Image (tube, rainbow, N blue to C red):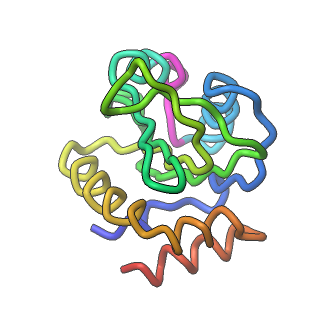
Amino acid sequence: MEISSYIKKELIKLNLPCKSRNELFQLMHQEAYKYGYVKEDFLQGLMSREEVFPTGIKLSNYSVAIPHTEAEYVNNQFISVVVPERPICFKQMDDETIETEVSLIFMLGLNKPHSQLEALKELMNLIQQEEVINKIIAAKNEEEVINLLDTMN
């Protein structure tokens, strides 16, 4: 599986103005719903899952998050790439009592369990490459992000 094949240009948001994780989820749900990628209850599924299974990942010099939900809320598979205007607090995956300021979010909308596992493996490999993460965060437009992720595979 190549994650770049699931990246949707219309769901790449650079310098997205939002102040909280929930606001980010609402904005991205609206976008994904507008394009028919998700069902109406995707937002609730996303927020519920994030409360039980936090997705913030703290690495040495930066933090990312990989929020996702159950397959039943997804119509068409996608991976959204979001760079918020300012870092957003997410609870850490490995210790939900600690929050980390996230600068890059990969939101998954996958409806096949195998796809989700493969995507998570590839993303875990990707997020450990600091140079690539910095380039995505600094990208000026959606094409730059797509090209960066294409060259990863």
Residue 124: image location, x then y, percent: 32, 56
Q: Is residue 86 left or right of residue 39?
A: right
Quarter of the view holding residue 122: bottom left
Residue 108: image location, x then y, percent: 43, 44
Q: Residue at x 41, y 18 (%)?
A: 97
Q: Is residue 16 left or right of residue 58?
A: right
Does 106 appear above or below 43? below
Q: Which residue ends up furthest to the left in the rendered image?
A: 114
Q: Which residue ends up furthest to the right in the rendered image?
A: 17
Q: Nearer the viewer, residue 141 or 103?
A: 103
Image quadrant occupied by the N terminus? bottom left
Q: Residue at x 67, y 51 (%)?
A: 83
Q: Is residue 42 magenta?
A: yes
Q: Nearer the viewer, residue 153 or 97?
A: 97
Q: Is residue 68 left or right of residue 134?
A: left
User: What range is drawn magenta here?
Assistant: 37-44
Q: Nearer the viewer, residue 59 or 55?
A: 59
Q: Is residue 47 left or right of residue 86?
A: left
Q: Is residue 8 magenta?
A: no
Residue 68: image location, x then y, percent: 41, 36
Q: Residue at x 54, y 65 (%)?
A: 133
